[in-house]
Image: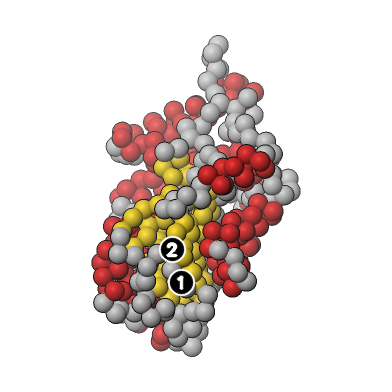
Amino acid sequence: MVVSRRGFIATAIAGSLSLGLQAQQDPEQNNHEQSNRKSGSGVGTGKRPILICAGNGFPYIDDAYNFLKNGGDTLDAALRVVKGPEDDPNDTSVGLGGLPNEEGIVELDACCMHGPTRRAGSVGGVRNIKNVSQVAKAVMEHTGHVMLVGEGAERFAVDEGFPRENLLTDNTRKIWLLWKETHSDWWGSGLADPQWKKRLSRSLAQKTANTSQPKDEWQLRIDRMEMVAADLGIAPEERMAAIRKVLFPPTGTIHCSTLNNKGEMSGCTTTSGLAWKLPGRCGDSPIIGAGCYTDQDVGSAGATGSGEENIKVAGAHAIIENMRHGMSPLDAGRDALKRIVRNYNGDMERLKFIDMTYYILRKDGAYAGVSLWEGYETGKPHRISVHDGTRRNEKTVNLFPGVSQEWPPTPST
Ligand code: GLY
């Protein structure tokens, strides 16, 4: 990889947006947090059996709940949930139809933990196999290892009977081509780099525009992207969503944790990871203790969002340890989020471009969904799906008000 040819840094792409956010004011934040603590608003105590997952698992939790209720294994119940998005070509964050790496190749990560037997399995950077959560389980059951990656993981999966298939759909191929045509020089050092700064200047945009009423650089960029999207055959109603995925590479992912009548617990997480990533990049999802952690004595937790940030705080493990020492699921999750905030010394200019959601289930059925921000987009809050006999979606409890990565981009000042 030749870093120098990439003119600007990944996370700083969005950094030229006008944020209008300076240091967070604690009293406001605390009020906001308090107002979010209503029962049924991302926190609660469910009845056994119970399962929780990210919102993209919602369509699949009825079947998994019934399986759990009828005595099915806790990990198999969780795998039933996440298999839904893995098989769905229209879920671009997981399995078949997941957004690819920078070379247009889909690479998947997953891990699982089985509470009753205290075992774990994981795979990273797997190509051509869509149900990687089940491959992680096979690693757990059929090897003495915990983690397999890359080609070895793929060969193991094929030996285990998993079919090889092309995971890139026509839809994701077109979005990847849009990224390739318009935005593929984006890699470089990241948000955590001490030299990080917002990328684009308005004066450059004005020179480029060459009109008496110059457009903002972002608008010029988006106009061009719309033209390229049209040339690629992306339907008009899908163009802005595709552009958003190019400008703000999503991390997607699904996590599910389960608890049965006997108090047994399991968890699993699966993802196609960060869109347009460097080949071989693994996020938090296959990392036991980051993307997922289950301790039969305490609880189970998992994550979706900025994988690099979650790895650095070992989020799922930190949450379980917090609960082991007496914190509620809500406080345990918020503490993990605050560790991410601490890693940036509370710098909201950078934190605006990070998002993280934790799904937390304690052994007594108490649960919480917590997130750094309300959602990625206004009007689309992060959700935790819950089933304890009643199937529901609940908005997560967010640490900061507002959404990450404002959209549509506003002119820089
Ligand atoms: N959380 C998924 C990833 O960053 O890969």
Q: Amino acid at mark 2?
A: Thr
Q: Amino acid at mark 1?
A: Asp
- Residue 318 percent across, percent down from the top left: 60, 67
Extreme-top residue of the structure: 212
Give the residue drawn at x 30%, y 78%.
Answer: 72
Q: Quadrant of residue 200?
A: top right
Q: Is residue 113 above or below residue 403?
A: below
Q: Does dot 1 land on a helix, a strand or a loop? A: loop
- Residue 217 percent across, percent down from the top left: 55, 27
- Residue 225 percent across, percent down from the top left: 43, 34
Q: Nearer the viewer, residue 97 or 225?
A: 97
Q: Quadrant of residue 181?
A: top left
Q: Which residue is mark 2?
A: 45
Q: Nearer the viewer, residue 72 or 168?
A: 72
Q: Is residue 6 above or below residue 293?
A: above
- Whether residues under marks 2 and 1 lie with C-beta atoms below 8 angstroms apart, the answer is yes
- Asked whether the viewer can see residue 315, the reply is no
Quadrant into which the C terminus falls: top right
Quadrant into which the N terminus falls: bottom right
How far apart marks 2 and 1 lie (CA) works out to 8 Å
Q: Which residue is mark 1?
A: 364
- Residue 159 percent across, percent down from the top left: 35, 82
| Crowd class of label 2 (few under 14; some 14 to 19; many from 20; radius 10 Å) | some
Q: Is residue 278 above or below residue 128?
A: above
| Crowd class of label 1 (few under 14; some 14 to 19; many from 20; radius 10 Å) | some
